[in-house]
Image (cartoon, rainbow, N blue to C red):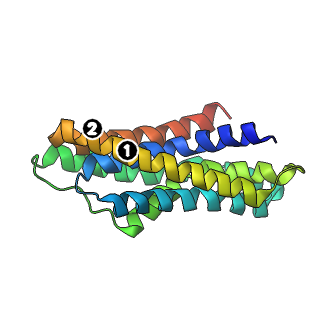
Amino acid sequence: MGALELVLLAVGLSMDACAVAMSNGMCHKELGRRRMLGIGVCFGVMQGIMPLLGYFLGAACSDIISSFDHYIALVLLGFIGVKMIYEAIRGTESTEPEPLTLRLLILQGIATSIDALAVGVSFAALQNISIWGACGLISAVTCVLSIGGVVLGKRCGIRWSGKAQLFGGLILLGVGLKIFIEHMWFS
């Protein structure tokens, strides 16, 4: 796999994390630079760990992993998204969304990086790839794009103020459904 293909793969894998980071930025307008960096690093680390895990699990377990990974992403992102939508609809505009705890960020990071696990399994079949370099690049690209997503989300959240939590929940639900549909009918 060449460098260009690896960069494009990293960008593709990071899109789900970027969308969730944007949702976080929309709903949490008070995020400072350290928290934005923390979101990017958390998503980047999770996105880098998953292909590494997939690589070490290897092709022997790929059928087992690919048979349920999309369900996990759908349940995790769907739960968080539906909860946000519910709170936005039942609450008032001043209702604060669930705090961005490390636990929540890790759950979001896992849910958005499950497809990277499958990529890691496919890396095990390739002989001309440096798994450490590939995982490092995927992690770095995801980190940078997720920070950009948070910044963009904050700007959109300020404009949409009271509807940010609703839009954020819809984004999370949409990403979960996208992962599920892709794995069910297009893989």
How many dots with numbers?
A: 2
Q: Residues within 10 Å of mark 1 (few under 14, many from 20)?
A: many
Callout 2 amino acid: Cys
Q: Earlier in the sequence, mark 2 or mark 1?
A: 1
In this rendering, position of residue 87 left or right of residue 76: left
* Label 2 close to label 1 by CB (< 8 Å): yes
Observer able to see residue 166: no
For the residue pair 99 and 155, the one nearer the viewer reads as 155
Q: Tell me the quarter of the picture where residue 65 sits.
A: bottom right
At numbered mark 1, what does the secondary structure look like: helix, strand or loop? Answer: helix
For the residue pair 16 and 137, the one nearer the viewer reads as 137
In this rendering, position of residue 60 left or right of residue 16: right
Callout 1 amino acid: Met
Quadrant occupied by the C terminus:
top right
Q: Position of residue 85 (x, y in %)?
A: 26, 45
Quadrant occupied by the N terminus:
top right
Q: Which residue is mark 1?
A: 22
- Residue shown at the point (40%, 68%) measured from the top left: 102
Q: Position of residue 149 (x, y in %)?
A: 41, 44
Observer able to see residue 90: yes
Q: Which residue is mark 2?
A: 156
Q: Position of residue 178 (x, y in %)?
A: 51, 36
- Residue shown at the point (59%, 54%) measured from the top left: 140
Farthest-out residue, right: 127
